[in-house]
Amino acid sequence: MEIDRAIKGSEDTRLKTKYDNAIYVIQRALALYKFEEVAFSFNGGKDSTVLLHLLRAGYYLHKKKPDSSSGTPKNCDEKFPLRTIYFESPSAFPEINSFTYEAAETYGLQIEVIRLDFKSGLESLIKEKPTAAIFLGTRIGDPNAVGQEQFSPSSPGWPPFMRVNPILDWSYRDVWAFLLTCQVPYCSLYDQGYTSIGSTYDTVPNALLCIDDSSSSKENFKPAYKLIDGRLERAGRAKKCYPSASGDGPVISNGLTGVDSHQTGTLTASIISVGDEILFGIVEDQVGPSLCKKLHSIGWAVSRTAVVRNDIDSVAEEVERQKSSADMVFLFGGVGSLHSDVSMAGIAKAFGVRTAPDEEFEEYLRHLTGDQCTGDRNEMAQLPEGITELLHHEMLPVPLIKCQNVIILSATNVDELDKQWDCLIGSESSSSQLKLMAPFLSKHLSTALADVKIAQFVSQLCLEFPDIRIGCYRKSRMGPQIVSFVGKDHARMELAVKALRQKFHPEAFSDINCG
Ligand SMILES: Cc1cc2nc3c(=O)[nH]c(=O)nc-3n(C[C@H](O)[C@H](O)[C@H](O)COP(=O)(O)O)c2cc1C
Ligand SMILES: Nc1ncnc2c1ncn2[C@@H]1O[C@H](COP(=O)(O)OP(=O)(O)OP(=O)(O)O)[C@@H](O)[C@H]1O
Ligand SMILES: [Mg+2]
């Protein structure tokens, strides 16, 4: 079988794994459902063209299996009589129509053309012929893929059937690697810069493939497989854009959004460090305190810091609590591809979404590590689905990740934090959004006076200066008491300090520097 041979002969290990997994899904579906009750939803698009050839290969391999009763291979010819449904619309591109019909003819598909909308068409199809399962070329990243698995029952309100999605976890790159490796024909529009094809009303060539050629009066485009960032495959779909997590179209922004409503006042952050080793006392967390200082320096109040175990539920519980009480949550630790790296899964759980491969992030990781991952996918590229934004910066080899109002830092020490912080607030596009406000100022006074002597006055001062955080602490039980004043208004702070000093002997309090 030429498809199977082409993949087996290729050196692309990732493609081979994707192929094997898709074939596995197809074979399970063919074993689960009667062949005459299975249909293939084919529309001549690139994804369904990939699926066509996977189905041909899967069918061939399924039939070729030794017949358990006779022990001999079943007879197998290369005709492919799978029921194939095509929803033909008057606004389809003529190139798509002709490619669909030609492919059906070439491969012997039993095509059934439906000229109704999807739902009504499927209702009448199922009434006419029992249809238990339908193969679709849906991929993660398609707007309708959210929440789907490889086997997903049709949605409530839709006629009942199983949606089988063998290429759900394929990336744009995988699709093109397959079509080019197998050298199968595909719709000619993809060679004219179209990267995802809807109707003639909503689809144009992808501007990212436009060739800058001033000598030509006509716009020219590179072929679809030249698109580098697969997340932008829908950039040519005028009305239905790829929904970015911020909901503002295909532009991947550095968007630290969600805080714009707070034009004034103080924004609050909370910090979650994930690490059993901190809780065991093996490692001392230095990132958290350093982050507190950095946040104060841009005027953010830190409302809570927490250390949680490397455990999905512990992360999920803490994120769930913090994401609604703080304006921004910063999380570090538990990020990577080891068994203990559960932060992403915990965040996904807190937001009630699953994790799914993020094609763009995977691409960054591949540049960094090469093809070193051993499993069928890089676990580090599994990110919470539908809520993830990548925060890019030229100084970062891999972007930071933001899930709604949770920013995930990959820093494991203070130097790395310094770098990531500079990138977070230093880039033009983000600075306007991770609001930089008047920094917190602080003043610290040391005194040998006993607690009981100052207690009443300090309480009184707190009432008089509600805008200044006045706290007392000591570095040792027998050592001096330190009174701290933290606020944004320098004059008010000085007033509070003066008010305290006036109540006691002039030498009772001395200024100290607490860095
Ligand atoms: C065979 C088939 C089954 C579908 N089943 C469902 C379904 O169960 N639930 C649903 O919301 N949409 C279903 N749809 C509609 C798709 O989710 C989606 O709207 C359609 O593929 C159009 O994609 P586009 O908006 O990218 O052009 C189905 C479509 C097809 C062709
Ligand atoms: N008009 C249609 N008739 C039959 N199946 C369809 C139709 N439109 C969509 N589908 C099914 O939904 C899947 C996803 O559609 P989608 O448009 O995302 O992919 P595609 O058309 O294969 O490729 P592209 O993203 O390049 O347009 C298709 O692969 C196909 O299985
Ligand atoms: Mg399409």
Image (cartoon, rainbow, N blue to C red):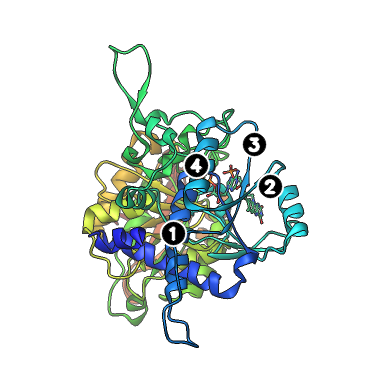
Amino acid under label 1? Leu
Asked if disc 2 is less than 8 Å from ligand 1, the answer is: yes
In the rendered view, would you say 138 is above or below 96? below
User: Under tag 2, what secondary structure?
Assistant: helix
Neighbor class of circle 3 (other Cα within 10 Å; few <14, some 14-19, many 20+) is some
Q: Quadrant of the C terminus?
A: bottom left
Q: CA distance from mark 3 to mark 4?
A: 17 Å
In the rendered image, which residue does mark 1 sit on? 54
Identify the residue at horizontal 49%, vertical 39% (top origin): 99
Residue type indicated by callout 3: Ser
Which residue bears the numbered disc 3? 89
C-alpha separation, residue under disc 3 versus residue under disc 2: 10 Å
From the viewer's side, name the closer residue of 252 and 218.
Answer: 218
Assess mark 3: CB under 8 A from ligand 2?
yes
Among numbered discs 1 and 4, the one appearing first in the sequence: 1
Q: Which mark is residue 102?
A: 4
User: Label 1 vs label 2: CA separation?
Assistant: 23 Å
Measured in 3D between alpha carbons, the distance from the residue under mark 1 to the one under mark 4, in whole angstroms, is 18 Å
- First in sequence, mark 1 or 2: give its number: 1
Q: Within 10 Å of the Cα at label 1, are there few (<14), some (14-19), or many (20+) other Cα atoms?
A: many
Name the image quarter holding the N terminus.
bottom left
Query: Where 246 falls versus 5 (above or below)?
Result: above
Label 3–label 1 contact, CB within 8 A: no
Dot 2: within a 10 Å radius of its alpha carbon, few (fewer than 14), some, or many (20 or more) residues?
few
Q: Residue 148 at x, y = what percent? A: 57, 60
Name the disc covering residue 118, or none.
2
Which residue is painted at 42% across and 56% down in the image? 170
Which amino acid type is marked by label 4? Glu
Q: Secondary structure at mark 3?
A: loop
Q: Which dot, 3 or 2, sits closer to the camera?
A: 3
